[in-house]
Image (cartoon, rainbow, N blue to C red):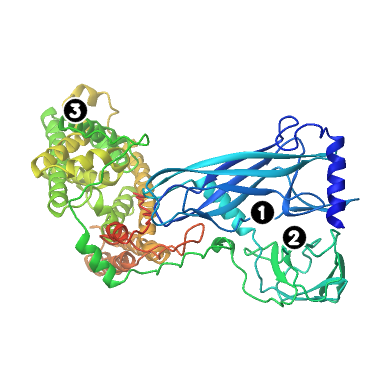
Amino acid sequence: MRKILLLSVCFSLLAGFGFSQSPFGQGGPSNVSLTLKSDWTTAVQGDTVNLVLQISHTGGMHTYWTNPGTGMPTTLKWTLPAGYATGQTLWPIPKAKDSELGVSHIYENQIYVVTPLKIPADAIAGEVEIGLEADWLECDDKGCLPKSGKASVKITIGVPAVSDPEAKGFANKVAFQQPRQLNSWKVETGGSPELFEVRLTPAEGANPDPGAIYFFESTAEPALKYEMPKISRSGSTLVLQMAKENPVASAAITGFLYAPKGWETGPAKIEALALGQSASVSATAVPETAVAPANQTAAAPAPAASTADDISAGAALYDLKARPTFVLLSGMEEKTLTLLPALGLVFIGGLLLNLMPCVFPVLGLKIMGFVAQAGEDSRKVKNHGMIFGLGVLVSMWILSGIIIALGLNWGAQMANPFFVGGILVLLFVMGLNLAGVFEMGTSLVGVGGELQSKKGYSGSFFSGVLTTLIATPCSGPFLGSVMGFALAQKAPIAFLVFTFFAMGIASPYVILAFFPNAINKLPRPGAWMDSFKKGMSFALFATVAFFLGTFAKQTGYDGLSWMLFALVMIGLAAWIYGTWGSPFMKKSTRFAIGYGLALSVGILGLQMVRIAAGKEAPLLAGSSDGEFEWKKWFPGTMELSRQKKRIAWIDYTADW
């Protein structure tokens, strides 16, 4: 009876809307459009991908859910290659629209429908096309027209999987909307031959007012009338009563309850609850970050730590000398860099590196040194410039020699928290010295009134060494490909590339030293230099703060906390030395407090640095979509994954 009524209603509406034309796909352009995507644009044999159908409604039109209420269901028909199979389609939660004809279950605006596609294990490699034909009833307040449309998507089979992030996001969103069981409500179903009743009792912590609850029936042959449920309250229990279309005594009624305000409080907010007539459900809610489509099994979380067997097997497969092939976004292989362009690029890179935040503090100090030299013997000024350049070269040769000999990556020392901790302490102590907390002789940074002496020369050399150490990490963003080229060459060529890099870093200082006219244009030495020196201490402290971010990523919150307290202790030791270690203090005080106590506190601070560097940042608990947990990388991870035909994601970052 109900079906006859619905059909008569639909035909009368269609007649008023111009049904004299062809019923499907005719009668003017449709206000509903289809777009089909896959969450994986490429896949390997045996994979399952999600086909994501975007249905866009314009002009105030709406279509209907699979159980349409007073309407006609939207149907999908797939055209698949041989051996391919689709799973259960996941529909988003529809809207219940009440009218004088009854309740309709409709979709408006833009929705996404997800259908899993199983690729056969023996699928032929190459591009395949998945076709879809959809039929729907397109309605607005004036009337309805049946329409149809087609869409398709192409997937490349037999190559490593590449995802479509947008389609994957839509698929996850629809999966999260699927009905599930919750532990925040006690649900009891029952009733009589004429009524279907649901009793809902909230547990502690549940939202006591979930809003205007509606029951979406998903029974194969709907048994309930398309009416809004009658809701009453008995104490804290909500009671929903829905009239049956025909008196049914024993047939199961399935569906889900929708609550606009959600069933729970907190991050696991769920708006759809699955139930059946004979079931009293009480289970654990599925959090938003761990949802899998109803017809699929969620991927089992990977263990937080790799096994010894995996590490051993990976080490046997890992080729230390292997270099990846770089492929551009266009799909073309990147052209190989040759020696002459590499030398030019690395020299310019070293030159520009002097403007990076890591190196700029040392640059400022060195310029102040040139200011102090103004008016001095030009020969000595040139000597200081050359010695500074020699410090850059020698330290670069030592560093590059170690890197080449051990087969390390450029900047790899910055991945060692003990090295980063040492740099932090050195820069912090230098900053305290410039700020006037203590004095250790101006030769420490190569500036001051004794630049023409032996100490001054050693200070210039040390400034060059320090520049090299600090410059290494800052070169990564724009010299990665050049350094990759260098490390792939034989040792002499690699050594030459690093030499040109050092020459680029040192060139501004050497050039400035050899042009005394430029130095003479700098301000004359005076009291302003003390203020400038103290001001430059803040540049060093800013560099410390910059490297603290790297240290925190390596050692986690515990490591960062230990390091901050260690710097406090080292700062205290520097203050004790600066206050009681002066030559003007009484000898006994100077040795007992200025030297002894300062040394003890400093050693304690260094011990805290060692503890801080020994901490390890915790592994990430899981991905943003909850499908896997992160494991710490070990040599051979990718090789093992390929051997086992697994997909592996590498999260490779460099904060330094």
Q: Earlier in the sequence, mark 2 or mark 1?
A: 1
The residue to which callout 2 is attached is 261
Q: Position of residue 438 (x, y in %)?
A: 30, 54
Identified by mark 3, the residue type is Ile
Residue lying at the far left of the rendered structure: 492
Task: Point out the tag, 2 or 3, that comes first from the N-terminus.
Answer: 2
**Above/below status of 266 relative to 74:** below
Disc on the earlier residue, 1 or 3: 1
Q: Amino acid at mark 1?
A: Pro
Q: Which of 516/145 is in front?
A: 145
Marks 2 and 3, how far apart in space?
71 Å
Q: What residue is disc 3 on?
A: 511
> Which of the two residues, 268 or 396, is positioned nearer the viewer here?
268
Q: Residue 92 bears which disc, if any?
A: 1
Spatial CA span between label 1 and label 3: 69 Å
| Secondary structure at numbered mark 2 | loop
Q: Which of the two discs, 2 and 1, sits closer to the camera?
A: 1
Q: Dot 3: few (<14), some (14–19), or many (≥20) neighbours within 10 Å?
A: some
- Is mark 2 in CB contact (under 8 Å) with mark 3? no
